[in-house]
Amino acid sequence: MNKQALRADLLLLLTSCIWGFGFVAQRSGMEYVGPFTFNGIRFILGSLSLLPLIRFIGRKKGGVLKQAPGSPVFASLLAGGCLFIAVTFQQGGIMFTTAGNAGFITGLYVVLVPILGIFLGRKTGLPTWIGAGCTLTGLYFLSAAGHLESINPGDVITAISAFFWALHVLLIDRLVKTTDPLMLSSGQFAWCGLFSLITALGVEPFLGDWVEALNPALRSSGLFSWYSLPELLTGIGSGAISGVFLRDSLIPILYGGLASVGIAYTLQVVAQQYAPPAHATIILCLEGCFAAIGGILLLGEPLGAWTLLGFCLMFSGMLVTQWEVIAGGFGGKHAGKG
């Protein structure tokens, strides 16, 4: 492996690590603000953080980025709407499951993309179905955690988000053919943030009571004793919310917006120019592993034998699903820039 490819792999590993620990930020952020407020602020920040990269690349290309024959605003609106649904289910699922579970279950989209591609006329081989079987078996062990008669509802909600993440991947695959990918990303993040903040104004004042009625232990633990967006705005305006609270709440929000979106996306764009597809596939699948590590180290989440078995089966299933890419990448045939 040459030095350039090694550096690219290390950047992808850092990207995977940032994304994995982002699940910890998503969970701990709800100590302070509601889920829609958290997503709204972080995606607006993420959108803004990509603007310097867009400007830099635009200058390198002579100030001209790829232009769409249609409206780039409409393309980003479509992608942003799908993204909003995906992150809403994901953030909702994280309220009831661990960061590690959420990280691995979100990775189901790796398996779902080729399966959903069947409806678009794409061929799906045997590795996809074997990988799907391994992943679903792992999901069952992960969610049941030794109590096979009970399934964690948070895992089910997160699995629904994985379905919309898969749809989002397929949608992006179509839209990037006519729209610059960085402009599309910044636009979709902005729309997702806007939708989240609008929803926060109408839903969050009632969401805390609903969560408490569903599972009183969640609210009593303090992890989800958030301020709704209207309460947050009123508290900031009146001075009832302390500066210490605002400072502490910014840590997970900034991580979720600037690190998970801005920095990690930039690293991915840079690294995949030089990393073989096989390397990128394996390394980015480690996101769930880092989510589990972050949950254990920072949130004190348990790691039992059933959970570990589920992690292993899901990770194996993700890799098997990508077998053609992996086999091609390690077979000595370089596919060019990822």
Image: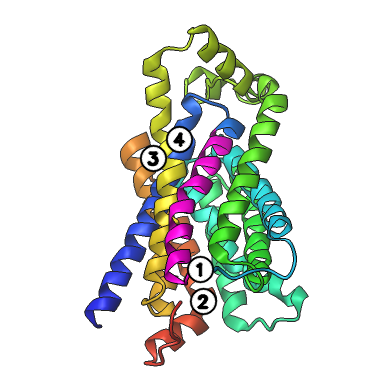
Q: Give coordinates of residue 237: x percent, y percent.
A: 54, 12
Count neighbours of disc 2 (C-alpha within 10 A) and say few if under 14, some if 14 to 19, many if 20 or more.
Answer: some
Earlier along the polypeptide chain: callout 3 or callout 1? Answer: 3
- Using the numbered discs, state the Cα–Cα distance from disc 4 to disc 1 in whole angstroms: 29 Å
Q: Are marks 4 and 1 in contact (CB under 8 Å)?
A: no
Q: Which residue is mark 1?
A: 318
Q: Nearer the viewer, mark 4 or mark 3?
A: 4
Earlier along the polypeptide chain: callout 2 or callout 3? Answer: 3
Q: Which image quadrant for residue 250?
A: top left
Circle 2: element type: loop
Count neighbours of disc 3 (C-alpha within 10 A) and say few if under 14, some if 14 to 19, many if 20 or more.
Answer: few
Earlier along the polypeptide chain: callout 4 or callout 3? Answer: 4
Report the amino acid beneath label 3. Answer: Pro
Q: Which residue is mark 2?
A: 322
Q: Which image quadrant for residue 219?
A: top right
Q: Which residue is mark 4?
A: 253
Q: Give coordinates of residue 114: x percent, y percent.
A: 64, 73
For this view, does 314 lie left or right of residue 79?
left
Report the amino acid beneath label 1. Answer: Met
- Using the numbered discs, state the Cα–Cα distance from disc 3 to disc 1 in whole angstroms: 23 Å
Q: Are marks 2 and 1 in contact (CB under 8 Å)?
A: yes
Q: Tell me if I can see residue 171 in this picture.
A: yes
Q: Which image quadrant for residue 286?
A: bottom left
Q: Nearer the viewer, mark 2 or mark 3?
A: 2
Q: Residue furthest left?
A: 3
Q: Nearer the viewer, mark 2 or mark 4?
A: 4
Earlier along the polypeptide chain: callout 2 or callout 4? Answer: 4
Circle 4: element type: helix
Write the start and end of the magenta stretch as one range.
38-62
Q: Which residue is mark 3?
A: 302
Q: Is residue 184 magenta?
A: no
Circle 3: element type: loop
